[in-house]
Image (spheres, helix red, strand yellow):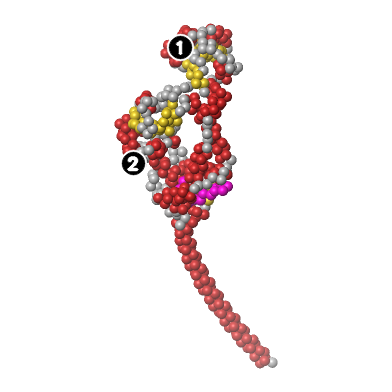
Amino acid sequence: MAKNKHQNHKKRRESTVQSAKKIAKREEARRERKLQKRKRILKVTALAAAAVVIVGAVSFSLYKLLQNNGVFLRANVAAESKHFTISNAMFCYYYDSCYKSYLDYFESSPDGPGFDPDKKLKRQTTEDGGTWYSYFLNNTTEAVETVLKMCESAYDKGFQLTDEQRANCQKRAAELDRSKMPSGVRVEDIAAAMELEELAASYHKYFTDQISITEDAVDAYYDDNPAKYLTWDMLCYTFSWVKDNSETTSDDGTIRVNLNSEQATQYANELAAIDDPEEFTDYVSNFLTTVKKNSKEDAQKIVNAMKLSTNGVSYSDEIAEWVLKDNAKVGETKIITKEGYDSHQVYLLTSEPKRNESETVDFRTIVLSYATAGSEADAYKQAESVLQEWQQNGADEAAFADMATKYSEDSLTYANGGLSFGYAESASTYGENVHDWLFEEKRAYGDYSILKAPDASNGNGAIVIAYFVEDNPYVVWQNQVYKDLYNAEVAKLDDANKLQRVSFHDDNLQKLDF
């Protein structure tokens, strides 16, 4: 029995050992399998990582390729209206045009453009803290909005470019310098942008060319609105009052005498009884020095300011009605007392209402100031240089207009090619020398001259290059009426454009590399 137990125990022990060995083998096998699996995982992971690197490299290269080819520039929409779309690539042309125009304008300025053209504009700030990119972007978006709105108005009227105009856009696009634009901008992008620009300009010209203002229309509009075109002269002095008539002394020791209501009324009535301009002036001068205790110098300044000469709509409604409807006569006076103003205004009519019958001319100018050039002599040299460039570019009126747009400092006319339309013989804007040259009887179309204008009305000496266009057939008042009627017709196009909607994609615009 004991032997059997021993044998059984031995068998169990051997069985246990065998089991342990089996378990160890299985564990070793499991560890081996786990190690092999880990190796396979590491191998796969390494391959995957390599694949990511390879794919990333390919993606970056593809991105640069697409960027350089302009795929993204053409895919991203910068601005759009109902029927027209401007891609980022097309927008680059408008932006570049705005940028170049700015550089051309400040080319001769001693202060320069205000930024470094060789550095990214997004990294340079203006005086107000914004970037130069934003500055040009804002100006460009305004221009683009105008173009798209005009194009939509053209579309509504079925107006289209001719094949010749499109071909010309293609030609100009191919010749344009693209060195400052992103590399992906192609000729076809510029041509497409130019076509929209051309469509807008052509439709505007077409619309304005259709405007016809007849002499009968001018006469009829004048008859309905005489106050706008009749001018007359007056003297006016104002008597103000306060509750008491005590004297006051200013910080500089000057004594000021205040009138009460009764005193102001008395003096106003006395002045209104005078019908002679010289006596009217003498009364006010004496009142200022003896009653108000002004110095003679100050009194004279006030007397000089009493002289008024303007058209009917510039006077108060009461005065315009008194002169035009009540047919006031020269020498008559009128007192105007406005509620709440504590004053009496005394008016003396010194001339009858009349239209300005001065003869007029049309001409173009390029104004070059002494201040910008540095001196009168430098401005004259610049004028000679501009004339030489004009002669090389055709020496005709169109070329002169281009030169005026490029060089003239006259803020009122440079954008219009320097054109002064209906310039009156009584005007003095450009000074005596220019006036005398313009109104010489021998003056003919195409005449030009370099003239000094030290007495120009803006107070700054300048050299003026003048180009004579023609004797205007209308006198001043007729041109005034014509201009108002013409502007009213143009306003119809402006109203139509205001109804057009344009949207900009700012997120895409910020992707442009300038």
On screen, residue 290 versus residue 158, left or right, reads left
- In the image, residue 435 above or below residue 29: above
Image point (53%, 49%), residue name: 85
- In the image, residue 43 above or below residue 21: above
Image point (63%, 88%), residue name: 10
> Residue type at mark 2?
Gln
Determine the CA span between mark 2 and mark 1.
Answer: 62 Å
> Residue type at mark 1?
Asn
Q: Residues within 10 Å of mark 1 (few under 14, many from 20)?
A: many
Q: How crowded is mark 2: few (under 14 residues within 10 Å), some or many (20 or more)?
A: few
Q: Mark 2 points at which residue?
A: 392
| Front-most of residues 168 and 441 | 441
Q: Is mark 2 on a helix, strand or loop?
A: helix
Q: In this figure, what is the number of numbered marks?
A: 2
| Front-most of residues 28 and 11 | 28
**Magenta span of residues:** 80-94
Q: Which mark is residue 81?
A: none
Q: Is mark 1 on a helix, strand or loop?
A: loop
| Front-most of residues 19 and 270 | 270
- In the image, residue 322 above or below residue 506: above
Image quarter for residue 223? Answer: top right
The quarter in which the N terminus is drawn is: bottom right
Image point (38%, 47%), residue name: 118
| Residue 16 in view of the camera | yes
First in sequence: mark 2 or mark 1? 1
On screen, residue 493 versus residue 114, left or right, reads right
Q: Name the residue under label 1.
A: 294
